[in-house]
């Protein structure tokens, strides 16, 4: 039982990071109807920036600057490459973001080097007991930070003028334009928020094991999460991210006992299996809006 | 009963005047095209007697990649279904062929059937079978959902190939590629008349021509028009009576068949398969071939595949011109990084500035010279 709770807890920790990444995907999708395959690069860039700044300004300062850097990167990419493509098919824009991801990651990998870079977080792999269950401190930190970020995002979308503008623009761009909302600013802000969220997620993914050149693959696990939750549902992204995290953690804990024929590291690809199953049953995810088909 | 009609003839000196629909749709519908293709074919078949084996090997790889790129273009360019799963189908083909032709007493699974005709067909069919399995997803999903699912397919495939050591030899170890024997002639070993490279070059070239003509015929037939209708507006297509399920399955099957054959040929040429190589980057390379070459064109696919295959050869020369670029993989700025960045930047650049790809560049050049010296 303790073993089960322990893996659920660590799954929630990892899942919180996926939820942050998934939120970024969904925010960009809601604003521009594009899935940004550039999120892995933003995540990696944020984490690497933190690992370089941590010696200068301490961990908290480095995280703030790193996240700001990732957000700026998102903003820059939107301005330079995505904005000229407004009105072109979404598939084309998605492939462009794939190109951005590849190019950016090579640059970032140059800064990582061949060895693992430590991010200098205060948690390491230490554990604390929560109700008798040993939980890694970094997972608690991830869960709390994610909860805080989600709360802030919720308040922002619900009560601020900009948040209202973003909701309006995602609902109907032309009407939003007619009401005096700068849709361009909404696009830019969406990419910045998504970049920042990816940066935060990157920091927490890098706690514990550090940053290496393979870390970007983690960011793609947010894709099963958004498919699970529905591409255009913020709540779905959070639920999807946590579910994917827990599934992955449970599979890694129990698969070697119950289904060893699936091979080592099956947990790494288990999110994609979940995604395929969900899509066969509910093509628009758990909370996604069913598309109305018109000719 | 069909009435045999005399074939409508084109009028002399009026190359753009078509007097019938069939004439317009012909494979090579203008005289310059016919001559150019003939010339190109002659040059292509003459090359193995001119170039050294190293260059031939590279060109052969390009031809094999072109078969795969044509396959991706069938499903993405003609039928409009965005798939990132091409690496998976290449892998299926490569492993089917390698397992069929492998040494029965070897370290990895092998059945000793080394006849090219047998394992090439099998590679295509097994890949097509998996394509048909995946296709139902495409009928339920649209656009980017499908892209994400096929991305998942690549990850799942990579996992299976890394774990199934009896077949693939395991990560880092790998297994030998398919053994090509045609009419009792071992094609990848030097013979009496030709070297191994020359034989493989000629075989792959013939295959490319066959596959390219097949793809063009598919595209200009009823099936191709159905694909285009689905690509442009699938709901409208289904309203006018195009069966979405039928044609999407067909598109995936055809595309996977091409990918399977391409995978088998690619690893016959390299002679070695590493299970970790069938990753997302490989899929992206094929996407890049299609986008850089030209979406929805066969000649574009071939141009794109040659471009992407020859790109490393060009970047490897960079250290000679730019001393700050290193050819050592551990140096801060090396040719491998530049290569990868170039994939990304070329995709972005072509999509931003020339969405029709190299094919579009060619059309522009042609139109410029057509009306030369008048600018319009």
Image: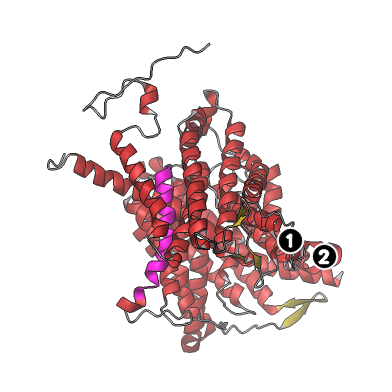
Does A50 sit above or below residue B162?
A: below
Closest to the observer, B368 or A84: B368
Label 1 or label 2, whichever lies nearer to me, is 2
Query: In which quadrant will I find the C terminus of chain B?
Result: top left
Q: Position of residue B150 (x, y in %)?
A: 60, 51
Relative to residue B54, is residue A16 drawn left or right?
right
Residue drawn at x 12%, y 43% is B373
Residue drawn at x 20%, y 44% is B368
Relative to residue B125, is residue B309 drawn left or right?
left
Q: Residue furthest front?
A: B192
Closest to the observer, B112 or A110: B112
Q: Residue furthest bottom?
A: A55
Q: Position of residue B91 (x, y in %)?
A: 62, 56
Instruction: Label 2, secondary structure: give it.
Output: helix
Q: Position of residue A53 (x, y in %)?
A: 47, 83
The overriding secondary structure of the stretch rendered in magenta is helix
Query: Does any portion of residue A272 appear in the rendered image?
Result: no
Q: Which mark is residue A15?
A: none
What whole-number distance in Å separates the C-alpha atoms at marks 1 and 2?
A: 17 Å
Does A24 sit above or below residue B362?
A: below
- Chain of the residue displaying label 1: A
Q: Which residue is mark 2?
A: A260
Q: Is residue B308 magenta?
A: yes
Q: Position of residue B280 (x, y in %)?
A: 56, 60
Q: Which residue is mark 1?
A: A247
Q: Is residue B254 magenta?
A: no
Q: Which residues are magenta?
A: B297-318
- Chain of the residue displaying label 2: A
């Amino acid at each position: 039982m303790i073993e089960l709770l322990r893996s659920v807890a660590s799954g929630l920790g990892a899942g919180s990071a996926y939820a942050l990444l998934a939120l970024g995907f969904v925010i960009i999708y809601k604003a521009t109807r594009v899935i940004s395959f550039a999120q892995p690069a933003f995540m990696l860039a944020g984490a690497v920036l933190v690992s370089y700044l941590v010696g200068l300004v301490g961990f908290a300062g480095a995280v703030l600057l790193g996240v700001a850097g990732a957000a700026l990167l998102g903003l820059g990419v939107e301005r330079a490459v995505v904005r000229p493509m407004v009105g072109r098919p979404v598939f084309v824009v998605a492939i462009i973001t794939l190109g951005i991801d590849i190019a950016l990651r090579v640059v970032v990998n140059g800064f990582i080097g061949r060895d693992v870079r430590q991010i200098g977080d205060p948690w390491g792999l230490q554990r604390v007991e929560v109700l008798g269950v040993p939980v890694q401190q970094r997972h608690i930190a991830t869960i709390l930070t994610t909860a805080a970020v989600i709360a802030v995002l919720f308040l922002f979308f619900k009560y601020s003028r900009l948040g209202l503008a973003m909701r309006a623009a995602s609902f109907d761009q032309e009407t939003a334009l007619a009401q005096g909302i700068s849709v361009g600013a909404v696009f830019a802000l969406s990419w910045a928020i998504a970049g920042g969220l990816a940066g935060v997620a990157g920091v927490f993914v890098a706690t514990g094991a550090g940053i290496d050149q393979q870390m970007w693959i983690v960011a793609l696990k947010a894709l099963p999460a958004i498919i699970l939750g529905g591409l255009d549902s913020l709540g779905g992204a959070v639920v999807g991210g946590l579910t994917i995290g827990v599934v992955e953690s449970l599979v890694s804990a129990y698969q070697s006992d119950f289904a060893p024929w699936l091979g080592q590291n099956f947990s790494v690809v288990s999110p994609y299996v979940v995604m395929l199953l969900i899509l066969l049953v509910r093509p628009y995810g758990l909370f996604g809006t069913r598309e109305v088909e018109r000719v | 009963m069909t009435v045999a009609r005399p074939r409508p003839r084109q009028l002399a000196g009026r190359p753009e005047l078509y007097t019938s629909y069939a004439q317009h749709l012909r494979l090579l519908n203008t005289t310059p095209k016919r001559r150019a293709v003939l010339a190109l074919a002659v040059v292509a078949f003459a090359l193995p007697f001119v170039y050294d084996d190293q260059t031939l090997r590279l060109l052969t790889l390009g031809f094999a990649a072109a078969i795969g790129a044509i396959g991706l273009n069938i499903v993405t360019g003609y039928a409009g279904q965005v798939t990132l799963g091409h690496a998976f189908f290449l892998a299926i083909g490569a492993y089917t062929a390698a397992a069929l032709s492998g040494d029965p007493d070897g370290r990895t699974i092998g059945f000793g059937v080394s006849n090219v005709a047998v394992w090439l067909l099998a590679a295509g069919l097994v890949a097509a079978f998996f394509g048909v399995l995946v296709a139902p997803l495409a009928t339920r999903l649209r656009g980017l959902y499908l892209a994400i699912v096929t991305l998942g397919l690549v990850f799942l495939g990579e996992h299976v190939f890394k774990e199934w050591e009896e077949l693939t030899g395991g990560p880092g170890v790998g297994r030998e590629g398919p053994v090509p024997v045609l009419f009792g002639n071992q094609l990848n070993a030097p013979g009496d008349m030709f070297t191994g490279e020359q034989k493989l070059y000629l075989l792959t070239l013939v295959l490319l021509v066959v596959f390219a003509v097949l793809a063009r015929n598919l595209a200009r037939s009823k099936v191709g028009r159905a694909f285009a209708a689905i690509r442009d507006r699938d709901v409208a297509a289904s309203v006018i009576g195009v069966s979405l399920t039928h044609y999407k399955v067909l598109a995936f099957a055809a595309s996977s068949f091409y990918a399977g054959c391409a995978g088998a040929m690619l690893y016959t040429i390299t002679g070695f398969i590493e299970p970790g190589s069938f990753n997302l980057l490989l899929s992206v390379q094929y996407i890049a071939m299609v986008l850089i070459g030209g979406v929805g064109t066969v000649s574009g696919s071939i141009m794109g595949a040659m471009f992407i295959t020859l790109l490393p050869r060009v970047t490897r020369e960079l250290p000679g011109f730019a001393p700050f670029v290193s050819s050592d993989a551990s140096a801060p700025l090396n040719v491998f990084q530049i290569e990868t960045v170039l994939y990304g930047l070329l995709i972005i650049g072509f999509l931003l500035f020339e969405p029709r790809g190299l094919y579009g560049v060619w059309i522009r050049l042609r139109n410029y010279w057509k009306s030369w010296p008048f600018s319009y």
